[in-house]
Amino acid sequence: MTKVKICGVNSEAAFDAVVQAQADYLGLQFFERSPRFVTPETAASLNARHAGGPLRVGLFVQPEPAAIASVLLVVKLDILQIYGSAELCRQIRAEFGLKIWRAIGVAAQSDLPTETEGLDGFVIEAKPPPGATRPGGNAVTMQWGLLKGWAAPSPWLLAGGLNPANVARAVTESGAPGVDVASGVESALGQKSPALIHDFVAQVRRIA
């Protein structure tokens, strides 16, 4: 079954919708430039709404280990999604003992990882457009066909520009075992739509 991650959850209504839709992963963004940023205190309050359910994924960009430590003092996370070098990701994995997904921007097949890098998985998306202020979450769709036949060394999620209307085609063309969506389930920038969350998960669950 294709895995589903809803990223950038920052409201009670969105959190409840992700749980009710039975997504596999729920993403919380701790990058202050993101319109989906949450403080550790807000994330902890949201987490307290439901025990169990989707695994909680914390997103960090080029983080200092101390910044991650300060978040983990307040909120429990199951997985860390890191924008940074493989070396930084391994350092964080060793320090905190949590699963690490490394986010990688791809423009050509040569950008795809060919080894595990000592990590637990990857989030694969398009490289950010010129002038972007964020390394991901820019609603940019990559060429899904680049991924077809890729011998992925670890579990991975496809991200970037996905929405309920195109996710089935994206999975078919890329062969992705999982998908990650943020802006594609929003009614306005940074504002999740519970209806779109339910629709997105339903569309993925229909994929053969």
Image (spheres, grey):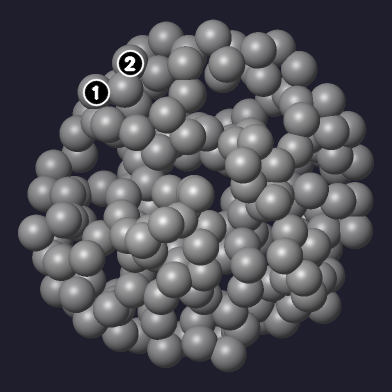
Is residue 178 shown above or below 90? below
Is residue 51 shown above or below 201? above
Question: Of helix, strand and loop, which one carries label 2?
Answer: helix
Q: Given contact means CB atoms under 8 Å apart, are the residues at marks 1 and 2 in contact? A: yes
How many badges with numbers are in the image?
2
Is residue 54 shown above or below 128? above
Name the residue located 57 percent from the left edge and 58 percent from the top edge.
5
Name the residue located 12 percent from the left edge and 65 percent from the top edge.
109
Quadrant that contains the C terminus: bottom left
**Looking at the image, which is closer to me, 173 or 155?**
173
Give the image quarter of residue 128.
bottom left
CA gap, disc 1 to disc 2?
6 Å
Q: Is residue 95 found left or right of 71 in the rendered image?
A: left
Q: Position of residue 75 (x, y in %)?
A: 73, 24
Neighbor class of circle 2 (other Cα within 10 Å; few <14, some 14-19, many 20+) is few
Q: Position of residue 163 (x, y in %)?
A: 58, 79
Q: Position of residue 136 (x, y in %)?
A: 46, 54
Q: Is residue 125 visible?
A: no
Q: Is residue 113 found left or right of 33 in the rendered image?
A: left
Question: Of helix, strand and loop, which one carries label 1?
Answer: helix
What type is the residue that disc 1 sits on?
Answer: Glu
Give the image quarter of residue 193.
bottom right
Q: Is residue 1 found left or right of 68 in the rendered image?
A: left
Marking on residue 38: none
Q: Is residue 187 visible?
A: yes
Query: Mark 2 highlights which residue?
Result: 91
Is residue 22 shown above or below 85? below
Q: Position of residue 101 (x, y in %)?
A: 40, 40
Query: Mark 1 highlights which residue?
Result: 87
Name the residue located 42 percent from the left edge and 57 percent from the top edge.
131
Name the residue located 26 percent from the left edge and 48 percent from the top edge.
154
What type is the residue that disc 2 sits on?
Answer: Gln
